[in-house]
Amino acid sequence: MSPAVLDHQFDEDIDVLIGNHHAQPKNLKLWPIATENQLLASSMGWEKIPKSSTNAFPVNKATVRIQAHNDGNPVYGVYFLHSSRQSGYGYVYSEKLIVTAYGTNPERKWGFNGYCFTGGQLQEIHDTVEHIESRMQEYYAHKRKLSGR
C-alpha cells in the first residue's frame, strides 16, 4: 500500500478516536491537558500549544511531550507545572512534577521527577496520568492496527 493511501486510510480511521476524544472518566477531576504535538492535539481533543521549553509550558495544565515511539509504545513525559512562587531569597520558581512513561506492555514503567503539590492534588495528578496513558494506548493500538503490526 502506498504511503498516500495509508495516510488517507489513517486519516479516515482516526475518526474512531476523534469521535470519542472528549470522553473522560466519570466522577474524576482531571487537570486540563495540552500538547505540542499537532496530531495528538487533534486526535485527542487536547489543547495545542506552541513548541517551547518546559519552563514555558502552561501553568496548571498537564502538558504531554512525546519523546520517542518505540515499536508503537510511546515514551512521553507529562509535565505538571503549578503556580510560580517567590522564595525567601527573591528567586521566582515554578513547582514542577514530571511523570515519564516508558517500556512495553505489560511491563510499562513510570519515572517521577520533581515535586507533588499539596491540597489534595495527588489524586487528580494520578487520575490525569491514568487517563492520558489509556488514551495513548488506544491511539497507538489503532496506529498498529492500521499499519498491520
Image: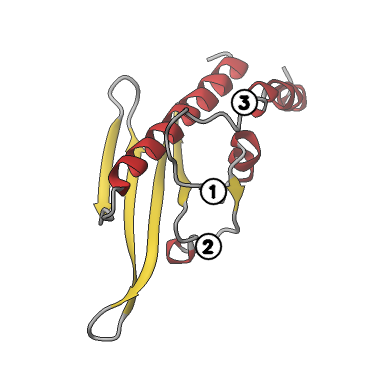
Real-space Cα separation, disc 1 to disc 2, in angstroms:
11 Å
Tell which tag, 2 or 3, sits nearer the viewer. Answer: 3
Number of other residues with Cα within 10 Å of mark 3, as a class: few under 14, some 14 to 19, many 20 or more: few
Image location (x, y in percent) of residue 37: 58, 46
Image location (x, y in percent) of residue 119: 28, 53
Asked if residue 64 lies left or right of residue 107, the reply is right
Image location (x, y in percent) of residue 67: 44, 45
Real-space Cα separation, disc 1 to disc 3, in angstroms:
18 Å
Q: Nearer the viewer, residue 109 or 46?
A: 46
Tell which tag, 1 or 3, sits nearer the viewer. Answer: 3
Q: Which residue is mark 1?
A: 35
Q: Nearer the viewer, residue 133 or 32?
A: 32
Residue at image coords 71%, 22%: 6
Q: Which residue is mark 2?
A: 52
Q: Is residue 60 above or below residue 2?
A: below
Q: Which residue is mark 3?
A: 20
Mark 1 and mark 2 lie on one chain; the one further toward the N terminus is: 1
Residue at image coords 42%, 42%: 76
Outermost residue, left side? 88
Secondary structure type for disc 2: loop
Secondary structure type for disc 3: loop
Mark 2 and mark 3 lie on one chain; the one further toward the N terminus is: 3
Asked if residue 88 lies left or right of residue 140, the reply is left
Residue at image coords 47%, 50%: 63
Amino acid type, residue under disc 3 in the picture: Asn
Q: Is residue 136 above or below residue 89?
A: above
Quarter containing the N terminus: top right
